[in-house]
Image (cartoon, helix red, strand yellow):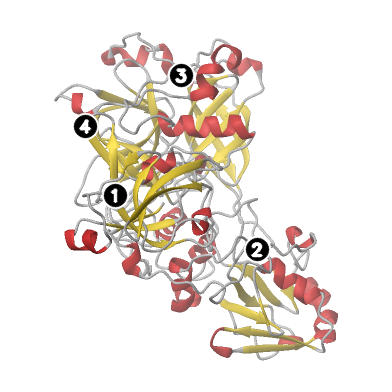
Amino acid sequence: MAIAAASCCFSSLSSAAAAYRGSLPGLGLGRLAPPPPRDLPFPLSCKSEHKRAPKRDSSSSSPAKTSSDKGKPISQKKYPGRSKDERPYPFIDGDRDRGSAGRSESTAFGSFGLQKKEKRGYDFTEQQSQTELGNIQDAAFLNAVVKVYCTHTEPDYSLPWQKQRQYTSTGSAFMIGDGKLLTNAHCVEHNTQVKVKRRGDDTKYVAKVLAKGIDCDIALLSVESEGFWKGAEPLQFGRLPHLQLLRIGQDAVTVVGYPLGGDTISVTKGVVSRIEVTSYAHGSSDLLGIQIDAAINPGNSGGPAFNDRGECIGVAFQVYRSEEAENIGYVIPTTVVSHFLNDYERNGKYTGFPCLGVLLQKLENPALRECLKVQSNEGVLVRRVEPTSDANNVLKEGDVITSFDDVHVGCEGTVPFRSSERIAFRYLISQKFAGDVAQLGIIRAGGFMKVPVILNPRVHLVPYHIEGGQPSYLITAGLVFTPLSEPLIDEECEDSIGLKLLAKARYSLARFKGEQIVILSQVLANEVNIGYEDMSNQQVLKFNGTRIKNIHHLAHLIDSCKDKYLVFEFEDNYLAVLEREAAVAASSCILKDYGIPAERSSDLLEPYVDLLTDNEKVEQDFGDSPVSSLEIGNDGILWA
């Protein structure tokens, strides 16, 4: 079970982590996805306020501290009225090298670090000062590690016009200079207030969240108070560990933070176990990660991990727990941290890690390579191309990708990494930024060619996180419409979602940017909608014969309708028909009876703009491009 190490520990995180993956073993959630290629980790923070009980029974609502739970974030939540020992422990956790993938990975922080060092106060160079680990409690760099106190107010996805009861959590963070700190994104998710406290101080200072990287589980904070920074020294960042140099008893790693079990700083020690592309539980992404055996517990999320020279080599963010394994923790390496900081510096905001947008297959079989006219033992087969990716304009199914920016791709989908290692092909993609161009070497029908591809973040048909924090909704005559999202699936009973809708959520691809699966969440009973009261969680496909693209499109169609009837078409040709004038007349009364402030979310008040041009024709029904479970198995290397 992967656990994030901040301080947000609550049972809903268990289901969130499972939904995020859709295929986490051992959770008993009935997800429709196949088993993942590897066990997945969980983020770690510690929550504190009592959470509202779920509206419907769900098997995913159990606390997240059992050894059978896998792939969950860890947080240290606090629940009023309970003793400290009774708190549940849900899990919430959390490089850029433009050269060859085979080069040694140093700090490589680019312009954000090295060029800004003197001007901004960031210091990403190596610090040669030796620190005796036996005296680490007296080390000066520990003063740069702070405790984070966050108050969260999550949206209510089933009742999207309101929010859930607030709760608090604690986590860890550390100073990087220029009045800024780093922590995990899951530590400050849905935050309404963030405060930080230095070691040995009893004053809490208000912090501001400047940027959150959901996919990499990193957040950038700032504190304006000068008193907080008095005498503070930012941490020094070190290079990526070299596994080939490891020997027993050496290359130690030390994790520092404020986990549960006490209020003072905690220090745990271990060694680096492996470095590879890792599943990030909070962000539903695959990025470079460092596996360690040092203890990481709820509340450690966002805290730094040090090497034996006192240099920060990454950010603790998640752990894996099961009956078969022990002491498996994960650290976000400095290469991923540098990518996040450089992205923020270049764009003034965080834009995210890009993807190639293709599903690949290994070419280990000689007959398969011969059939595709691949002469050498290299390359991966393009099985699917996402319609929303730029690669859809360049690549075709059946192409074989043999190189990425002149780095050869092996038949197992790996590329050279440092001097004597290999790593998953998607590692090269994660080194790019949104909008960057990659040169792909491909074999098509036996002929070799090079093609440029623009890389951008992936478009999810069913998002794992809601931008802006509050979900969109539309209420028409008591019919509540909202886009399908993973948080909504977590909050609802899966039986009420339905097998067909869950399959679409797991395996369908967006056919165009902005596409959504719009569902009828529930019906607020009224005379005008008699006979439809029991309808819930059904996808609405058409309105008055027009196929619905997204919820904004549905609102536009209803607003511009002049027909006598409002006709909604659902799955399996189920119809809901309302008289338009009666529906308009009843709306205000329904809102008043149910205490709802508005008939639609604020984003639907903006004029509708159709992003799908006439030239962009969709061959299949919207939201109806299934990806079979076989295509997401171990041989499906990635949706890059």
The local secondary structure at tag 1 comes to loop
Q: Which mark is residue 413?
A: 1
Q: Which dot, 2 or 1, sits closer to the camera?
A: 1
Amino acid beneath label 4: Ser
Can residue 357 be seen here? The reply is yes
Local packing at callout 3 (Cα closer than 10 Å; few below 14, some 14-19, many 20+) is many
State the separation of the CA atoms marked 3 and 1: 32 Å
The local secondary structure at tag 3 comes to loop
Local packing at callout 1 (Cα closer than 10 Å; few below 14, some 14-19, many 20+) is many
- Pinpoint residue 537: horizontal percent, then vertical percent: 56, 76
The local secondary structure at tag 4 comes to loop
Can residue 328 be seen here? The reply is no
Amino acid beneath label 1: Gly
State the separation of the CA atoms marked 2 and 3: 43 Å
Q: Is residue 491 left or right of residue 403?
A: right
Q: Which is nearer the N-term, disc 2 or disc 3?
A: 3
Q: Which is nearer the N-term, disc 3 or disc 1?
A: 3
Q: Which is nearer the N-term, disc 3 or disc 4?
A: 3
Name the residue located 59 percent from the left edge and 26 percent from the top edge. 204
Q: Which mark is residue 124?
A: 3
Instruction: Using the image, determine if residue 255 lies above or below residue 535.
Output: above
